Amino acid sequence: MAGNSNTSVSTPLSVIIIGCGRVAEKHLKAISKLKGLELKAVVDVNPDSAKRLLGSVKGFADTKFYNDYKQAIDEVKPSIVSVTVPSGLHFQIAKYAMEHGCNLLLEKPMTMSVSEAREIFELSKKTGLKIAMGHIYRYLPIVGLVREDIAEGKYGKVTHGTIYVRWGHDEAYYSSAAWRGTWKSDGGALMNQTIHAIDLLVWLMGSEPEEASAMIARRLRNIEAEDLGMAVLRLENGSLAQIEGTTATIPSKHTAEFSVFCEKGQLSMGLDSGKPHISVYGIKPDGKTKKLNGYYIRKQFKTGGLFSYKCALNPHLGIYKDLFESISENRNPIADAYAGFSSVDTLLGIYKSAKEGHPVKLPLSDDFNSVDMTGFFD
């Protein structure tokens, strides 16, 4: 099999990228900075897209190009297949790649239906192949360290968490490709722009969602799906998570904010027009509040060094490094196959709640697909 879980750390792993759109350039830049990876080919139905991608980063201009992903997988037999195509195509490519022995770096969402996400997750367990999800926020500096302390009870009981993702896109963005904003291939602001933020919030809070209540709207953008969604999740530990995701905001002012509130501390972090920020506070035994940023920064340098901070500029650098190490060490990636399945189940539970007009239990007992939302705004 191409994806050998016992691969030595010193052995370069072969990679092919399927899909040469916007996000693929971040993949290419990450691969260029990691000695343990070797790009063997790229795949796209549009030769111009492939040429543009390979010319965007020095050293890849002569990389082999395919217009058929099955042929590329069959001939190259890569260790890793990176899937960066529209979301509606994720399932068929991911399944074919894993059935042919390839580990995956799979952009979010894993699939557009609960049953397909479960099938990919089960296939990962059955084969032992690794799946690293493109849940970029898990790879930002300090985040994992704070999560460990929350999980260990350092901050006491988790009460609630909040996220907002205000990732404005204009009509030109949606009209640039026919699949954007469609229920079948993309979903709306929650599925496309907010799913990895939901993943991060649930991961930080340390408990699985058991109920979702939601409303969605189409306020400004001429698309099939929603440009605004709001939801509340109840987690198994009793905590609540509040979610806002929208593309109906100013395109030049992309912001995302995450907060987790605990009995003895709180975390707030986010991105504002590309600039990251984070604040961690804890309550000392004497009742006074202390800012803990310095503590976590020092700890991050001891554990991850400067590399961890480079991931703030391109989180895919961290995803690829973690995937390489998870294959070499035969462990799960930080954002693994279960994370991919769970986030799809939660997001589709949110959509189902909006469609039916009442809270729904999670995980979903029956299959639900994004196309089940077709006609919602008609």
Image (cartoon, rainbow, N blue to C red):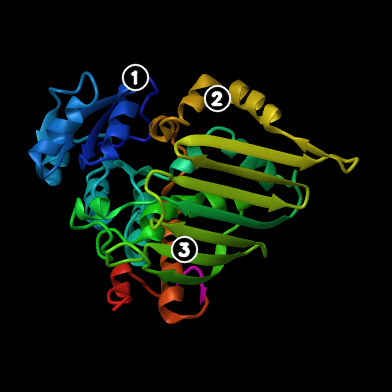
Secondary structure mostly taken by the magenta-highlighted segment of the chain: loop
Which percent across, then down, holds residue 71? 10, 42
Which span is picked out in magenta?
A: 360-365
Label 3 sits on a secondary structure element that is: helix
Q: Which residue is drawn at 54% across and 48% down?
A: 257
**Side of 345 where 370 appears, left or right:** left
Give how far apart the Cα atoms at labels 2 and 3 are: 31 Å
Which percent across, then down, holds residue 122? 38, 57
Residue 238 quadrant: bottom right
Instruction: Residue 346: give its label.
Output: 3
Instruction: Residue 35: give its label.
Output: 1
Which percent across, then down, holds residue 307? 48, 23
Which badge, 3 or 1, is on the more N-terminal residue? 1
Instruction: Residue 92: give its label.
Output: none
Label 1 sits on a secondary structure element that is: loop
Q: Residue at x 70, y 46 (%)?
A: 266
Q: Which of marks 3 and 1 is in front?
A: 3
Q: What residue did someone put label 2 on?
A: 304
Q: How crowded is mark 3: few (under 14 residues within 10 Å), some or many (20 or more)?
A: many
Q: Residue at x 25, y 32 (%)?
A: 15
Q: Which sits in the foreground, 71 or 135? A: 135
